[in-house]
Image (cartoon, grey):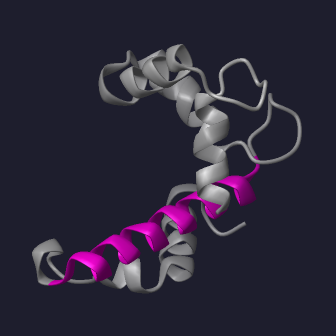
Amino acid sequence: LLLRKQLFKAFDFDGHGDINFTEFAEGYSTMLRGTVPEMLEFAWRLYHIQGTMDLLALTDVYTVLRLALAGLEEVRRMQGAFAGGSTEDTRFPERAARQILEHVVGDR
């Protein structure tokens, strides 16, 4: 649920609580073929959960990464053998997200 809310927030460019066609088209276009600065801004809005907009908390990154891995596992479960089966990373999203962040930023 939180990942869907964050994705919605990332598409809601004007922050009015709804997504009009222009915002949808711009967000979708950015995801598919945006410039690096556009994709970084979109990712920032996706990953930023709480606090001031100029800071991104490590807990925010962990939360979104964990939810993305859990969502990937759900898709793999629904698709069965066609998706290539589960991996260690998707079966245990909390552990995988923690390991990824520890590798990137060290043990904090």
Where on the picture, by quarter, is residue 15?
top right
Residue 5 vs residue 68, the one in the foreground: 5
Residue at the (79%, 36%) spot, across then down: 55
Does 97 appear above or below 25? Answer: below
Give the image location of residue 26, x and y in percent.
Answer: 47, 17
Residue at the (47%, 76%) spot, across then down: 96
Q: Quadrant of the N terminus?
A: bottom right
Residue 77 vs residue 105, the one in the foreground: 77
Residue 23 vs residue 3, the one in the foreground: 23
Does 29 appear above or below 17? Answer: above
Residue at the (14%, 77%) spot, across then down: 84
Where on the picture, by quarter, is residue 17?
top right
Q: Quadrant of the C terminus?
A: bottom right
Residue at the (17%, 73%) spot, across then down: 83
Give the image location of residue 103, x and y in percent.
Answer: 50, 64
- Magenta stretch: includes residue 97: no
Does 16 appear above or below 73? Answer: above
| In the displayed structure image, the side of residue 59 where residue 23 appears, left or right | left
Where on the picture, by quarter, is residue 102?
bottom right
Does 69 appear above or below 38? Answer: below
Point out the stretch of residues depicted in magenta: 57-80
- Magenta stretch: includes residue 78: yes
